[in-house]
Image: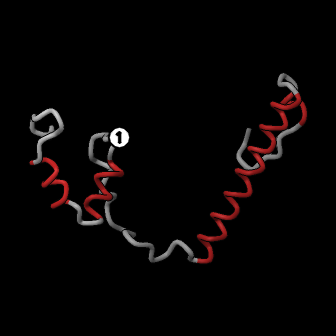
Amino acid sequence: MVPGAVPQAHAFGHLGKWQAIGMFFEWAIRIVAEDKIQAAMRDGQFDGLPGFGKPCPLIDEPYDEYWWIRRKIIREELQALLADARHKENSYGKPAPE
């Protein structure tokens, strides 16, 4: 289907009624969202955002499922707390893992 094109009833003929309704609403939401994004761009609402024109800091890093907590530690300057925790022993008497 062409983006922005109105889906025809026969395009959903092979689906059940509720699947077709769900797909239609998904299409409608995408159109509304795209229209709102385009209007915001025209109005300059995306101009001057923090980090605009700078490289994304996470884009070239390997995947890390704990990226969010690492960023929070850095952002809230909790590195000293983290370093202290690493030096303490865990409950089994072994050094905490790195």
What's the residue at 49%, 75% (across, down)?
A: 47
**Label 1 crowd (10 A; few <14 / some 14-19 / many >=20):** few
The residue nearer to you, when weighing 70 against 47, is 70
The x and y percentages for residue 33 are 68, 57
Q: Residue furthest top?
A: 14
The x and y percentages for residue 24 are 81, 41
Q: Is residue 50 left or right of residue 1?
A: left
What's the residue at 37%, 69% (across, down)?
A: 51
Which colour style is shown?
secondary structure
Labels in figure, total: 1
Q: Is residue 49 left or right of residue 11?
A: left
Q: Amino acid at mark 1?
A: Glu
Q: Is residue 9 left or right of residue 57?
A: right
Is the residue 59 above or below the residue 77 in the image? above
The residue nearer to you, when weighing 64 against 30, is 64
What's the residue at 83%, 40% (across, down)?
A: 7
Q: Is residue 51 left or right of residue 46?
A: left
The x and y percentages for residue 9 are 90, 35
Identify the image quadrant of residue 63.
Answer: top left
Residue, disc 1: 65
Identify the image quadrant of residue 96.
Answer: top left
The x and y percentages for residue 70 are 28, 52
Is the residue 94 above or below the residue 78 in the image? above
Tell me the element at label 1: loop
What's the residue at 31%, 41% (across, down)?
A: 64
Figure quadrant of the N terminus: top right
Identify the image quadrant of residue 98.
Answer: top left
Is the residue 89 above or below the residue 54 in the image? above
